[in-house]
Amino acid sequence: MKKELLILIFGLFFTMTGISQSCDITFDPISADYVAGETYSVILCFKDYTSGIPAYEKATWTDYYVNFTAAGTTATWEALGTGNTFDDSYCIKVTFVAGPVNSIKIGATATGNVNGCAQTESNTYNTVPIELSSFDVQQKNDEVQLNWTTLSEMNFDFFTVEMSLNGKDFESVTDVKGAGESRDRQDYNFTMPLNEKLKKFPFLYFRLKQTDLDGSFTYSDVMTLTTKTDNLFDFGINNAYYNNSSIHLEVTSFVSESLDVKIISMNGQTLYNKETQVYTGLNSIDLPLKTSYSGICIVQLKNNSKVITKKVFVN
């Protein structure tokens, strides 16, 4: 009696709230950004609502598809569960290599084996326009050589090589035309002179701006180049300033290591003293000042072989 009452209550609820759909196909994941050339899986499951309570039901699966896979590949479908088939399965799974298109549509038709409810559903997933697989910056003699590789490109227009002297403010160096549409590996390179002015900076920073045909763009990771060859330049302070009761540091390091960090007032008082971990690349570090001190102070960074300092005005 209680079971029949619950079914009746749920049935009334679905009727009153206007939910008339008696079955459905769910997708897992429901949304995602896929990179062309990479392998992904999506699970489709059938749910029946005819009893008023949404429940998984075994179904007969037909007309299942992925509308675009990478060249030379096909989607692989399987019915989930031991002994299950496409005529008797709660869920099915598709595995595929994403192709370079704007979006990928996955769909199927399922007919419930108990109540005969039939449903056709599809779901659309975004694809990433460009897959940048590598980006490398090296110094050779008096030149900087940049090399990068894409595994696929879709609706892509051009790269912009950008450089920075402080790791924060970037300027355009040159544009490099992309392949536009490609399912194959594309290798790119650019060489620029390393003049005497640039050699005065121990660190140079490079990134790629990737612009699509519709004008939208993304950035690559920032690559750091040292113009020095001795170990005195294994880390350096790019920038240091006082901000909201803390001193903000931007530190570039060519190794992951712990640094001894001190803040010392002009009269020799230690305002901050703590070991801080830095990682290869550009590090942003905030050093809290629990003091009412104002005036010029010295920020000191130290490892086993090197000590560098930077003056900062605290107000």
Image (tube, helix red, strand yellow):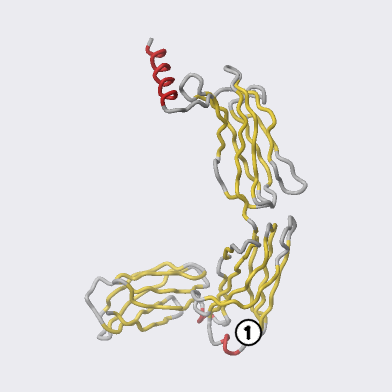
In the displayed image of the protein, which residue is found farthest to the right? 72
Amino acid marked by disc 1: Leu
Indicate the position of residue 282 as horizontal and vertical percent values.
49, 70
Q: Nearer the viewer, residue 155 or 80?
A: 155
Residue 230 is left or right of residue 242, and the answer is: right
Q: Nearer the viewer, residue 307 or 91?
A: 91
Indicate the position of residue 12 as horizontal and vertical percent values.
41, 20
Quarter holding residue 45: top right
Q: Which quarter of the rendering shows the N terminus?
A: top left
Residue 245 is left or right of residue 27, and the answer is: left
Considering only vertical position in the picture, is 172 above or below 179? below
In the displayed image of the protein, which residue is found farthest to the bottom? 196
Quarter holding residue 15: top left
User: Which residue has dot 1 on it?
Assistant: 194
Indicate the position of residue 16 as horizontal and vertical percent values.
41, 25
Q: Residue at x 74, y 55 (%)?
A: 183
Q: Residue at x 64, y 39 (%)?
A: 106
Q: Which quarter of the rendering shows the C terminus?
A: bottom left
Q: Secondary structure at mark 1?
A: loop
Residue 72 is left or right of residue 168, and the answer is: right
